[in-house]
Amino acid sequence: MTATAVSADPLLAFRAQFPILARSTYLVSNSLGAMPEATRQRLADYAALWDEIGVKAWAKAWWAMPVRVGDGIAPLMGAPAGSVAMIPNVSIAQASILSAIPFTPGRDEIVMSGLDFPSTRYVTEQLGPRFGARVTVVPPAADGLSLDEGRLVEAITDRTALVAISHVLFRSAYVVDVAPVIARAKQVGALVALDAYHSVGVMPVDVTALGCDFLTGGVLKWLCGGPGGSFLYVAPDVSARLAPSFTGWQAHTAPFAFADEMDYAQGAWRWLSGTPPVPALYAAIEGPRIIAEAGLEAIRAKSVRQTARLIALADARGYRVHAPRDDARRGGTVAFDVPHGYEVAQALLARDVVIDYREGAGIRVAPHFYTSDEELERAVAAIDEILATGEWRRFAGRRGTVT
């Protein structure tokens, strides 16, 4: 990386903080963000504290980490301090939300979309009815990769208790226009939960401006914070009047009193459950800090430019693109079909060009703020060579899970 390249793209100065970028062409931040070098020291700090003071580490640092780490992420989504709790994964966060809503015979509906991430739908469709809810799934638009927001709005009625949808669709990176959906929900008195796993960290998000009641996401992908560090934002006014029945001792006002009855804490604390996964919280610190330093406006501008370039490269080769062409409606990922896509993806991975593959979408390429323009060109040139030489044939008949 030359000084000229860094001056032309100041975000490339952050590359040195991510060691894997020196060893591979890493284009899969939509699945697992690159690890910051500083995370190694954070995890060493965790081990050292455990080793040095043992159980006293809970009082010194560990017990408050789910809220303290949440406070570090809150500014990246326009949330006030004390409103973001760190949760092991979004499925648990979604279960907490469902368990807090009083579904009644006159208001018992949950509205979702057919393109929400399957894990979220599994939880809602399995757990919702046990709380007395019925689930309405709005089908995709005709292209199968986007949503008709008008149909979503029409599905929200006086019976709707919760609208639980994605902010950015995982399969196509389609940015849902949530404003009219939230406005309609407020009009009828329904709550809104946004799954923002594919937006927070790669584009500006402002929960206060959006007016959503809940927002879930995680540091695994664009925030470069590793597995086990998801987050749940709850609007302060909503948090003050609802409490999850899916709960645990960390949500108690006096957890070490070991009281027989539950007495919920306030703010983000009331949305916690059992003992937190402390190592994951240590890993979750550095990525969001770097993202904040880089700036989400700059990250978004670069993402739009680089994903547009990927689309142009795919178009030049006649590949079908599974990503919105409208910059405002496109998240950080471009998927395109190439002949023998699964096998080509395996060949790319063997070359340490790190992407992923999804049936129905194709090869997904996800540049991030640390990605150089040259890496995009090299990745597509590698696809050309793999197809031209027949290298993909080495992987024929080896279907399996990719990343």
Image (spheres, grey):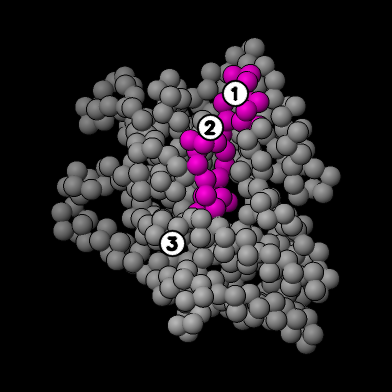
Residue placed furthest toward the top? 106
Query: Which sits in the foreground, 126 or 22?
Result: 22
Q: Residue at x 31, y 62 (%)?
A: 43
At label 3, which amino acid type do we have?
Ala
Q: Is residue 307 above or below residue 86?
A: below
Q: Which residue is mark 2?
A: 211
Callout 2 amino acid: Gly
Instruction: Name the residue that disc number 1 marks.
Output: 186
Residue 118, placed above or below residue 35: above
Q: Is residue 97 visible?
A: yes
Q: Between residues 158 and 389, which one lies in front from this camera angle? A: 158
Kindly report the distance in space between the C-alpha atoms of the residues bearing marks 3 and 1. 34 Å
Query: Residue under circle 3?
Result: 294
Secondary structure category for the residue under label 2: loop
Q: Residues within 10 Å of mark 1 (few under 14, many from 20)?
A: some
- Quarter containing the C terminus: bottom right
Chain-order first, disc 3 or disc 1? 1
Question: CB atoms at circles 1 and 2 under 8 Å apart?
Answer: yes
